[in-house]
Image (tube, rainbow, N blue to C red):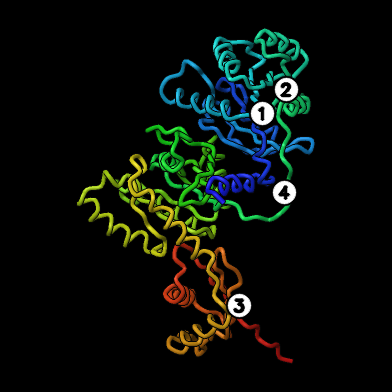
Amino acid sequence: MSGDETFGQAIATEYNVDAGAGPLPVLAVVGRPNVGKSTLVNRILGRRAAVVEDIPGVTRDRVSYDAQWNGRAFTVVDTGGWNPDATGLAERIAAQAEIAVGAADAVMFVVDATVGITDHDEQVVKVLRASKKPVVLAANKVDDRRTEAEATALWNLGLGEPWPVSALHGRGSGDLLDAILAVLPEAPRESFEEVGGPRRVAIVGKPNVGKSSLLNRLAGEERVVVDHVAGTTVDPVDELIELGGRPWRFVDTAGIRKRVREASGHEYYASLRTQTAVERAEVAVVVLDAGESLTEQDQRIINTVAETGRAVVIAFNKWDLVDEDRRYYLDREIDRDLARVAWAPRVNITARTGWHVDKLVPALDAALAGWETRVGTGMLNAFLGRLVAAHPHPVRSGKQPKVLFGTQAQSSPPTFVLFTSGLLEASYIRFVERRLREEFGFAGTPIQVNQRPRKKKERR
């Protein structure tokens, strides 16, 4: 089987369809900034998946979501505001929307019915006509009959019947979805066989450390918008990428500025989406700026990923800007601040030029191998017997709890349960964890060691 066939099967598996039938039909959602595209996408999905706020320009990248209506599945691609005359960051956002149209099977053009037709709308219509793709015209923000009458003026765009809808209240959304299914090709057959899909990798870190640049370098194209302004990425953007002859699903996430409970506005929802992306991933690549000192926020992000039980790879980006003096201090910062995650593989990369980005795959493989490691019960108890004999638990108040036996309850992440005669101290638990790593490896993965003290027999 060729590499292209394997990659095609991975795509089909990710969308839960038959590998021979191809991926799901794709609907691109485009329109001017702040016409309610992301709100309408959430209405179609039936959940709050896209980040929404009452300011223009919150969505910057093209973000894919799986949707379903009347038993038919399809993919919705949300895009940023499309302004053909934009410059700078807005121009790159518009370019992503244009790419989404080119890759879609059909387009939903969203217009603000309360504003009517603008010059920018007419320019977008010219591009849509040139694409030769079926277009469904959605007249959004139609909350009452008066506005519904005003929406009839959108016939002048020449795209056919405007479908009045209120993304906020759901008015007319069913008729709009029926019109969308009418122009989309039939979905492929569903497959109910359990087949392993691509490994899921989340790219996390502070704002402006180069997460989006890394995804673009891995994808080999401008998949996400990159700008020197911190916080450019808001919605998690996932992409199927073939590396090392295998498919991977990388997810670029919003930069984590502060604790979730301290964030506000779209930053709060972006933080929640980032947290969800990490929980759905198998391994997280924590990107750090090698040219800057490690901060408390960097350590908090790494600890948060480890606490979710995901494998961890630490990538020091912008290595081309690190001189000899900085490397000297960086080594000491690593020894001091990252001692608790010394088990995580580290790679030095430059996402902008692609230097040593190829070393990311071996590090991911090592972390996933440690994450899925399972130790047999017999081997584990033989190890615990030697450990307890050589280093018994200290005597406290005339009592000395002992480890009776242990078992690995699960992998991904490795979780151990120690059955003891009494409660073990936290320091001794950490000692056991450290020796487990020395004995069995577990590179790139957190370890959870739980204890189950024996209950005292009640006196009659």
Q: Which of marks 2 and 4 is in front?
A: 4
* 155 is higher (above) or lower (below) than 280: above
Compute the Cα span from label 2 to label 4: 34 Å
x, y percent for residue 188: 71, 40
Q: Which of marks 4 and 3 is in front?
A: 4
Kind of element beneath mark 2: loop
* 255 is higher (above) or lower (below) than 246: above
x, y percent for residue 64: 60, 37
Q: Which of marks 4 and 3 is nearer the N terminus?
A: 4
Amino acid carrying mark 4 in the image: Ser
Compute the Cα span from label 4 to label 1: 29 Å
Kind of element beneath mark 1: helix
Compute the Cα span from label 4 to label 3: 42 Å
Q: Residue under circle 4?
A: 191
Residues at discs 2 and 4 in contact (Cβ within 8 Å): no
Note whether residue 170 is visible: no
Amino acid carrying mark 1 in the image: Leu
Considering every residue shown, the one lying at the far left of the view is 325
Q: Residue under circle 2?
A: 165
Question: Within 10 angstroms of label 2, few (less than 14), some, or many (20 or more) residues?
Answer: many
Q: Residue under circle 1?
A: 40
Amino acid carrying mark 2 in the image: Val
